[in-house]
Image: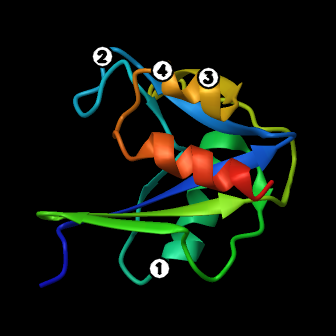
C-alpha cells in the first residue's frame, strides 16, 4: 500500500554545516521545531523532481538532486525521503514566511541542541556531515 503522505526533504551541506528551517509556531503539523526543507510529492512527480521544486519554492535555489535519498522512513501513512544536497545555485532565502520563521546553518553538535521535527534528524545530520 502506498503511503498517503509522500514527503521529501533535503540536507543542504556547506562548510561542515547543514541548513535547517524553523517551522512557525502557528503551523498545524510540527509547530515551533527545526525541520529539513522540502514538502509533499505531487501526482506524477518523482521524489527528486519534487525536492528540486520544493527547494526552488521554499529557498529560491536550483539544486542538483542525486538519484538516491540518504534515508527513507515509513511510519504508517507517511513516507519521508531525505537527500544530501551538496550542489545548488543561488543563496538560500526564506521565501515561505507562512511556513518558516527562520533559516539556520548548524553543525552536528549544534543540531543536537535543537528541538527537531523528528528524532532521526540528529543521526542524519551527523551522517551527512561525516562525509563532508
On residue 110, the disc is 3
Total numbered labels: 4
Q: What label sits on residue 66 in the rendered view?
A: none
Q: Could you give the CA–CA distance between mark 3 and mark 4, rounded to whole angstroms?
A: 7 Å
Give yes or no for contact between labels 1 and 4 (Cβ–Cβ under 8 Å): no
- Residue at the location (24% across, 34% down)? 29
Task: Give SS at disc 3.
Answer: helix
What residue did someone put label 4 on? 114
Q: Quadrant of residue 75?
A: bottom left
Query: Which numbered marker is on residue 26?
Result: 2
The label nearer to you, 1 versus 4, is: 4
**Does the residue at mark 3 contact the one at mark 4 (Cβ under 8 Å)?**
yes
Q: Position of residue 64 (x, y in %)?
A: 77, 68
Mark 2 or 1, nearer chain start: 2
50 sits to left or right of 118: right
Question: Percent position (x, y) of residue 128?
Answer: 65, 54
Q: Gap between marks 3 and 2, in whole Å?
A: 24 Å
Neighbour tally class for label 4: few under 14, some 14-19, many 20 plus, Cα within 10 Å: some
Which is nearer the N-term, disc 3 or disc 1?
1
Relative height, residue 92 to residue 65 (above, below): above
Q: Quadrant of the N terminus?
A: bottom left
Amino acid at each position: 500500500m502506498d503511503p498517503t503522505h509522500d514527503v521529501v526533504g533535503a540536507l543542504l551541506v556547506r562548510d561542515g554545516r547543514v541548513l535547517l528551517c524553523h517551522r512557525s509556531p502557528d503551523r498545524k503539523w510540527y509547530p515551533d521545531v527545526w525541520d529539513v526543507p522540502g514538502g509533499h510529492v505531487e501526482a506524477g512527480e518523482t521524489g527528486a523532481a519534487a525536492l528540486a521544486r520544493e527547494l526552488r519554492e521554499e529557498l529560491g535555489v536550483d539544486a542538483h538532486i542525486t538519484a538516491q535519498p540518504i534515508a527513507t522512513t515509513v511510519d504508517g501513512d507517511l513516507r519521508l525521503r531525505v537527500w544530501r544536497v551538496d550542489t545548488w545555485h543561488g543563496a538560500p532565502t526564506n521565501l515561505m514566511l507562512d511556513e518558516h520563521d527562520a533559516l539556520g546553518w548548524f553543525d552536528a553538535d549544534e543540531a543536537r541542541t535543537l528541538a527537531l521535527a523528528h528524532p532521526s534528524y540528529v543521526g542524519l545530520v551527523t551522517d551527512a556531515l561525516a562525509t563532508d
